[in-house]
Image (spheres, rainbow, N blue to C red):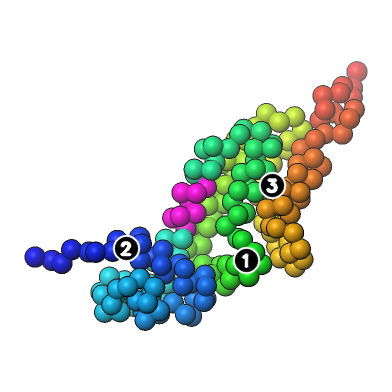
Amino acid sequence: MPRRKQVPDADVLDAALDVLHARGPQALTFAALAGASGLAPATLVQRFGGKSDLLRRTLLHAWDRLDRETAGSGARAERTPEGAVAFLVGLSGQYGGIDSYADALLVLREDLLDPDVRRRGAAWRQALTDVLDACLAGTPGAPDGAGALLATHWQGALLWWSFDPRVPVAEHVERELTRFVAAVLTPPAGSARAGTRTGP
């Protein structure tokens, strides 16, 4: 009779993610994961194969978690521009302080090196944009592709914050995205986008 698993793979991969974020991709070894998970290195090798397989499984597990968080937060987001901003502010909480954001960039490098993992990132961008488009639908003055524009500005706001992280990331993101929404989604008074007739 095969031996029953005592620790689910998802729990082991959560521990692997902790190692990955705390110590970097190179530190994700079976010995390190054994210490974090309480399982023997041989057991981990049997479950996950080689070190590269373990890293890939861990990266895909991280995307699974992000997809679930995005779907859950997106379903709860208020369908307004303010709801779109709040949705992205909420997702920004995963970055924490500057140290954890910098560590996340090391993990992003690993994502970008794997074509299959890159595809997960592209799919997440679409899911993100779909939520933002739903929040912005019907907003007077919103240009075509407003959701994608807002998502792109969000990522830029995160990067610029990282160079001068004097305020919490959520505070910075909320301020910058609110300014963006006011500038891009609010038509100037008297403009055609505001509904003013410009012709006979």
Query: Nearer the N terminus, badge 3 or badge 1?
Result: 1
Q: Which mark is residue 9?
A: 2
The residue shown at (32%, 63%) is 9
Name the kind of residue labelled 1 in the image: Tyr
Read off the residue under disc 1: 101
Query: Nearer the N terminus, badge 3 or badge 2?
Result: 2
Q: Is residue 39 left or right of residue 141?
A: left
**For discs 3 and 2, the disc positioned in front in the rendered view:** 2
The x, y position of residue 92, in whole percent, is 62, 54
Q: Secondary structure at mark 3?
A: helix
Screen quadrant of the N terminus: bottom left
Furthest residue in direction top, as rendered: 200
The x, y position of residue 178, in whole percent, is 75, 44
Q: Main secondary structure of the magenta part?
A: helix
Name the kind of residue labelled 2 in the image: Asp
The residue shown at (89%, 24%) is 198
Count neighbours of disc 3 (C-alpha within 10 A) and say few if under 14, some if 14 to 19, many if 20 or more: many
Count neighbours of disc 1 (C-alpha within 10 A) and say few if under 14, some if 14 to 19, many if 20 or more: some
Q: Which residues are magenta?
A: 63-70
Query: Nearer the N terminus, badge 1 or badge 2?
Result: 2
